[in-house]
Amino acid sequence: MTDNLADADMLNYARTVADKVGENDRVMHQLRNNTPEQAFLGDFPQAVDDAVMGSSEAHQNQMLQILSNPQVAQGFARVVFDMLLNKGNA
C-alpha cells in the first residue's frame, strides 16, 4: 500500500495509464519488437510520464463535469452502480 492508496487503487491507475500508453503506436511497436530492457531505453518511459500527466488533467476535467452537472452526475452514478452489481456476478 502506498500512502493511503490500496493495491487495487494502484492497479486501477496502472490500467488507466496502460490504456493511454497503448494508444501510442510507436511505443507499442517498440514494446512488441524489443526486450523489456531495450524498450525501457526507447520511448516507453516518456510515454508513461506523459500518460500520468495527461490522466491528471483528464480526471480533473471529468470531476468538474460530474460535480457541476446533476444529469452527468446521475449518469455517472448509474454507470458505477451497474459496474458494482456486475462485479458481484463476474
Image: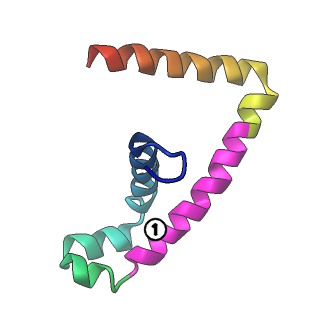
Where is residue 76? Give x, y as percent.
Answer: 61, 24
Where is residue 31? Give x, y as percent.
Answer: 26, 72
In terms of secondary structure, what is the magenta stretch mainly?
helix
Numbered circles on residues, count? 1
User: Which residue is pictured at 37% across the width and 67% down the height?
Assistant: 25
**Which residue occupies the foreground of this view, 19 or 8?**
8
The residue under label 1 is which amino acid type?
A: Val
Bounds of the magenta segment? 43-63
Magenta stretch contains residue 2:
no
Where is residue 52? Give x, y as percent.
Answer: 54, 61
Figure coloring: rainbow
Q: Relative to 23, is 40 on the left or the right?
A: left
Where is residue 21? Give x, y as percent.
Answer: 42, 62
**Which residue occupies the foreground of this view, 86 or 9?**
9
Q: Which image quarter is the C terminus in?
A: top left
Q: Secondary structure at mark 1?
A: helix
Magenta stretch contains residue 61:
yes
> What residue did someone put label 1 on?
48
User: Which residue is pictured at 71% across the width and 30% down the height?
Assistant: 66
